[in-house]
Amino acid sequence: MKSLSLATFFLLGYHCQASLIRLPVGSTWTNNAWGDGNSKDSTKGMKVVDVDLFDAKESRIKELKENGHVVICYISTGTTESWRQDYRENKSEWKKVQGRDMGDWEGETWIDITKLDKIKPLMTRRFQIAKDKGCDGIEADNVDCYQNKCVKGKSEKDLKSYQLTYNRWQTELAHSLDLIIGLKNSVGLIKDLAPFYDFGVNEECVQWKECDNYKYFTQLDKAVFGTEYSGSVSKICSTAKKEKMMTKFSKSGRWKNCFDGDKKLPETVYYPEEEKPEEKPPVEEKVKEKVKEKVEEKVEEKVEEKVEEKVEGKPTLIRFPSKTTWSNQAWGDGKVEGSAGKKMVDVDLFDVSKAKITELKSNNHVVICYFSAGTSEDWRLDYQENKSAWQKVEGTNMGEWEGETWLDITQLDDIKPLMTQRLQIAVDKGCDGVEPDNVDCYQNDCVNGKGSSDLKSFQLNYNIWLAQEAHRLGLAVGLKNSVGLLEDLVEYFDFAINEECVQWDECEAYSHFSKADKAVFGTEYEGSFNDICKTADKYSIMTKLHTEGEWINCFVEEYPLPETLYYAELDPWEKFYETVGHYNMPTDVRQKLLAKKHQKFF
């Protein structure tokens, strides 16, 4: 089976949650899958039934669901099991990913989680079996390899990032198939992974005094199912009650519960439906319509001729798919964070050396260079070398930022050469793209005597020009903040960057980018980490929180880093509308075409 890429599953993410079942805190359950009493646990009064994926018949799963149960199918995603049918059918591929022997479980061997590319197609097949059998979700076992010396020569510290990446990939794969998924044990990763899993499963947290860790699930109203094999029943049940866990203990080969069954099984609940992406006509249809109805014959001929000239030697632009990982080394309250395991690295255009950019790119990072496109900064070298030109286009003072002044965006003809120079610096240093900051002047009283409604068309005009000028020079470009213009500008920009959309309840607006499979990078400076990450995940925003002088990520690092992606080559004529959005067209042609959509801007 062909392996699906990590980027593909990042794209799919939680868009599938419209049909995902939700297991709230207090969900009752029966364990028919594993443990000391697995064949002797009644389903009566139990909403969730845990079964072994390979042992349970499809007819049995169907029967359980018809009787109002939610069926979770147990599989091992962290070991090879020599008795499983899929192993026997494909021994050579399973053996390639084997790590150390488990020792106490005959025929079972840890998987080497550093070999993710080889593991993924094997696990994709197992998840698909669950989907085909009718399972509602998956209990993925042995996802704590990193703590069990599973790979020869690798320590727990070496393997932790691989484990996080692998576990998060499993959640994305499950959700893409409309399956919920539970985190089994792996207590050391609960804080990082609870926002992404749908429930937790634990063995012996009372015995090992680890149950407190499951608050990261219960605080999100996600069920936690527990088992214990020894100890005081009263202590087990009192701890379970305190931590809101649905715990059962093994006694005389049977499961006994610390909770009562449901007198009547509750209705199955689902995650809230998300807004579906608007259905838009294919690009080809838009092109035909525009050409036929809105573009004069004379302009059409000129466009065809000019686009062909441009496309022949055009640079290929890097593409940032939804949920691209990133490191912020350019700005914010946090200390400079490391770049390991993060595909995109954001740096300050003027402060970073060309050698550093070259080093990052040689390590498979994509480098985005930050600069301000909406203000003058009197400490920058290009400002000091050309003060009169910068002072000519200055608007109102920023106030809280000493030495920084808004640009008067009504003076576009004088601003453009200054910004082209900055973009050229980015090209010369080897940046893959740029993050132009302060492109929301129109909302910040940046020009004396002009209000937001007066300046909006100037802002749109300027931002579109910035995107096209960057593309002309072969640079990807991101839209920073400017939330009120997202819908108008998504087609021109390659990614988005936001500060504090959770705090200001503005994150939903970024659906315009995520639905177009364009990455959104976010930062927050205060608030609940769980709430921030839950919102970020809902809208596919790769968010980091500044806390105690550090950047803390809602997402996990990637090892190894994925391949760099590029926009597909564009056909010179049939795709000219996309070309207008991504490359700088001759001014007169661009104005006539875009004026049809943005009547006021040109």
Image: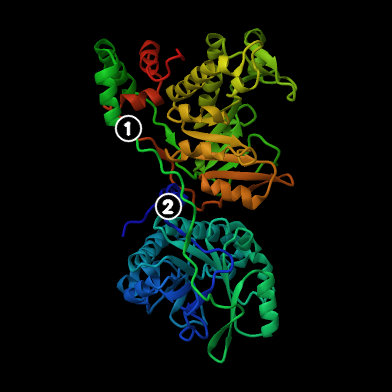
Instruction: Tell me the tag on residue 419.
Output: none
Q: Secondary structure at mark 2?
A: helix
Q: Is residue 216 left or right of residue 276?
A: right
Judge by depth and name the residue closer to the eye, 357 or 69.
69
Question: What percent of the width, then of the height, locates residue 32?
Answer: 46, 80
Q: Secondary structure at mark 1?
A: loop
Label 1 vs label 2: CA separation? 30 Å
Decide: few, some or many residues near mark 1? Use Cα within 10 Å; few <14, some 14-19, many ≥20: few
How many marks the image carries: the answer is 2
Q: Amino acid at mark 2?
A: Cys
The residue shown at (60%, 65%) is: 155
Q: Closer to the camera, 411 or 366? A: 411
Q: Is residue 53 above or below residue 331?
A: below
Amino acid type at image mark 1: Glu
Q: What colouring method underlies this structural image? A: rainbow
In which quadrant of the rendered view does residue 378 lie?
top right
Residue at position x 42%, y 62% in the image? 119
Nearest the viewer among 568 and 429 is 568
Is residue 431 at all visible to an observer of this figure? no
| Location of mark 1 (residue) | 569
Label 2: how many residues lie within 10 Å, few (<14), some (14-19) or many (20+)? some
Residue occupying image coordinates x 53% and y 90%: 253
Q: Residue furthest bottom?
A: 252
Q: Position of residue 109 (x, y in %)?
A: 46, 75
* Residue labelled with disc 2: 16
* Nearer-N-terminus badge (1/2): 2
Quadrant of image for the N terminus: bottom left
Front position among marks 1 and 2: 2
Image quarter hosting the C terminus: top left
Figure check: 198 above or below 273: below
Q: Position of residue 77 (x, y in %)?
A: 46, 68
Q: Quadrant of residue 176?
A: bottom left
